[in-house]
Image (cartoon, helix red, strand yellow):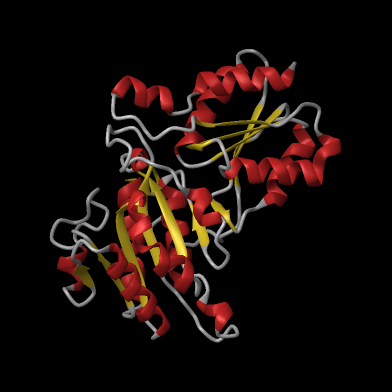
Amino acid sequence: MPNMNFAQAINDAHVIEMERDPNIYVAGEDVGVFGGCFGVTAGLLDRFGEKRVKDTPITESAIVGTAVGAATAGLRPVVELMFVDFIGVCLDQLYNQAAKMKYMFGGKAKIPMVLRTSCGAGIGAAAQHSQCLEALFMHLPGLKVAMPSTPYDAKGLLIASIRDDNPVVFLEHKMLYALEGDVPEGAYTIPLGEADVKRDGKDVTVVATARMVHTALEAAEKMSADGIDVEVVDPRTLYPLDMETIIKSVKKTHRLVVIHEEVKFCGSGAEIAATVAEEAFDYLDAPVIRIGAPFVPVPFSTPLEQAFIPNAAQLMDAIKKVME
């Protein structure tokens, strides 16, 4: 298998699907000539032309609004917002239109659109360009939410998202774009709603998303030196959420720690923890622990930003606590 970084894998998914289906187009700020803010759409304009790769004005409401209309008319738009923080500008188009149309038209409407956007802290982009807002999208009926952690998952999930007849919010942590890994050539799909056990273990289940998957794997490797065997589960999609795989893991390990970069309060980990408490409480040998960012805007200062982001040391402390 060829080695690709995360951004190249997403680009490859675009190319494969755009060659397969002429109804797919890409639109967003600087996605054409510039190749995207993080280089994800590089080369698409030269390959597919201006009719299918559209540089847009700086107006997120128009980017998403036209995508909703185009999707209902039979096209399959893949639109990019530079940063998830800008979602407020086009939220009405997303949650009042795209998410609700199938329901309001009695199931007859199809909205096959993908909204790609970057999220996460780590590059000093400050409070308005560094948030993780996945819990917001999870709470909106009608949307699917994908959040890959590896190049392999990114390509397979994006192809599946493009082929889905429902609106998908596709979240890409900006600190993962340079991450490299083996990615198969050609098309393959990863079903939306299918978690992946990134590391087998028997003592503690750690559920982690996006960049925190790699933090969890780092912590798991260090904990193995202390004789603690950590299982790491990556949901990959937050809606549909594969609770079956998570609960199966908890029933094996009897302990659960959830880690994500979003603010801990009302984050995706709260839903995971609550569902485990409802459906697998009798299997737990310790309370569930959630790790997330503090309830503050993302700092600009590098030391403060690093303190804001959950880390392996915090996770290792939590693992030791549930093992006591």
Residue 186 visible within the image? no
Residue shown at 73%/29% (left/top)? 202
Q: In this view, does 221 lie above or below 116?
A: above
Occupied quadrant, residue 193: bottom right
| Figure label count | 0
Whether residue 137 sits left or right of residue 297 in the image: it is right
Occupied quadrant, residue 72: bottom left
Whether residue 220 sits left or right of residue 293 in the image: it is right
Quarter in which the C terminus is drawn: top right
- In the picture as drawn, the residue positioned furthest to the right comes out as 282
Residue shown at 53%/74% (left/top)? 100
Q: In this view, does 188 lie above or below 304?
A: below
Whether residue 307 sits left or right of residue 252 in the image: it is left
Residue 110 in picture, x, y percent from top left: 49, 80
Residue 82 in picture, x, y percent from top left: 28, 53
Residue 83 in picture, x, y percent from top left: 32, 50
Q: In this view, does 317 lie above or below 214?
A: above
Occupied quadrant, residue 10: bottom left
Q: Is residue 311 above or below residue 227?
A: below
48 and 135: which is toward the camera = 135
145 and 220: which is toward the camera = 145
Whether residue 160 sits left or right of residue 227 in the image: it is left
Residue 83 visible within the image? yes
- In the picture as drawn, the residue positioned furthest to the top comes out as 226
Residue shown at 58%/47% (left/top)? 235
295 and 173: which is toward the camera = 295
Residue shown at 61%/55% (left/top)? 194
Residue 212 in picture, x, y percent from top left: 49, 35
